Image: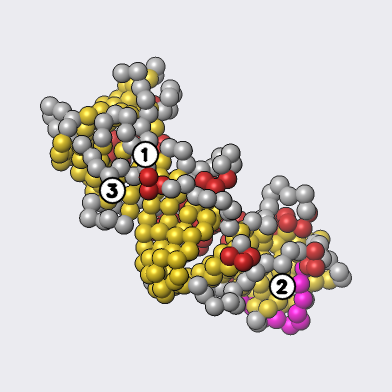
Amino acid sequence: MKLSVMQENLARGLSVVSRAVSSRSTLPVLANVLLRTEDAGLKLTATNLEIGITYWVPGKIETDGATTVPARLLTDLVGSLPASERVDLELQGADTLHLRCGRFATHVKGIDADEFPTIQTAGERPTTRVSQKVLKRALDETVFAAASDEARPILTGVLARFEGSRLTLAAADNYRIAVRTIDVLDPVEAASVVIPARALGELGRILADTDDPVELVLAQARNQVLFHLEGVDIVSRLIDGQFPNYQQVLPASHATRAEIDREELLRAVRPAALIASSSANIVKLQVGGEDGGVVVTATAEVGDYTGDVEATVEGDATTIAFNARYLNDVLGNVQADRFALELNGPLSPGVFRPVGDDAYVHVVMPVRTTS
């Protein structure tokens, strides 16, 4: 294997694929990145056996070949090289990669490419396609709500429900639910799968703010899903199991409704969260009442906080307590100028809906307090 690539292209590719590198595997080769010449360029691949990322780097190939080298070491080495310079790569012997850039040269010991697991790449007919910009927003607004605790593995994933020209993404832990419905470019037969939130998080980092499509290949026979965009493939295993019926938790009606500017409420909640973080992380919202609007409060041993937010309130006045982190998450991640907050008293879930956008809903469970 002998080839030349540009430093910035190689650095970019390594930064993308290295996010799939295994940090805890007992297989040494999974700490490596696979380098293989293909299609007049260099194909970089990394995997932790759950997620696999492939990135194509344009280059000039002299001789074909493949090897694997430690991903973190190679990423750091390439990142330290002069930008906009040519990097020459050559496999010497069975497993030594020689890297030269200008007056810099190094040798890195690797592991034979045959020991690297086979990773599925695009080639099959896409199940459907989705605008990158649309999918990126949907992932930003849902993935954060998935559980990080492995106690219930199904909740560490995001439900993807395909139905005709619509795709609904739903994420939940024991305290909140986020649901976003988007349009796909090609109608698809009804199907539901659960995709690991981590895989979708990595996909969201790669997607661009463009209408160019990302292809989606649903290979349920292999229990995998593959996303393909220009120069990048992400393949992920699916999570087995039945995702909870989140629709049963969505309140069908409300006794109180407040329309609030999202930025104003976020500015009120953030200092409240700082005070609340020293105790139980509880922030209270008093909705309606004598002055109307919404009053955000927090009380702890370190002090207390009160913030007033203008709002249009309909229905009964009520006070409800939430975990401050969950409020910050929904207000900070969801694109909306104004939210409608729908409530049914202090012990029922709070529902956040972007005003004028029926395709998104976010439910947060309240915190029981003594007062």
Three-letter code, disc 2: Arg
Mark 3 Cα shell of 10 Å, populated few (<14), some (14-19), many (≥20): many
The x, y position of residue 166, in whole percent, is 38, 65
Q: What's drawn in magenta, residue-wise? A: 58-67
Three-letter code, disc 3: Arg
Q: Secondary structure at mark 2?
A: strand
Assess whether mark 3 and mark 2 are in contact (beta carbons under 8 angstroms): no
Front-lying residue, 177 or 38: 177
Q: Earlier in the sequence, mark 2 or mark 3?
A: 2
Identify residue for label 3.
Answer: 353
Indicate left or right for 73 with 296 as reference: right
Q: Secondary structure at mark 1?
A: strand
Question: Is 144 placed above or below 118 here?
Answer: above
Q: In the figure, residue 356 lies in which quadrant?
A: bottom left
The chief SS type of the magenta part is strand
The x, y position of residue 30, in whole percent, is 73, 56
Q: Residue at x 32, y 29 (%)?
A: 347
Assign the N terminus to one quadrant of the image: bottom right
Q: Secondary structure at mark 3?
A: strand
Q: Earlier in the sequence, mark 1 or mark 2?
A: 2
Q: Earlier in the sequence, mark 3 or mark 1?
A: 3
Identify residue for label 1.
Answer: 364
Three-letter code, disc 1: Val
Which mark's residue is nearer the viewer, 2 or 3?
A: 3
Question: Is 141 placed above or below 228 here?
Answer: above
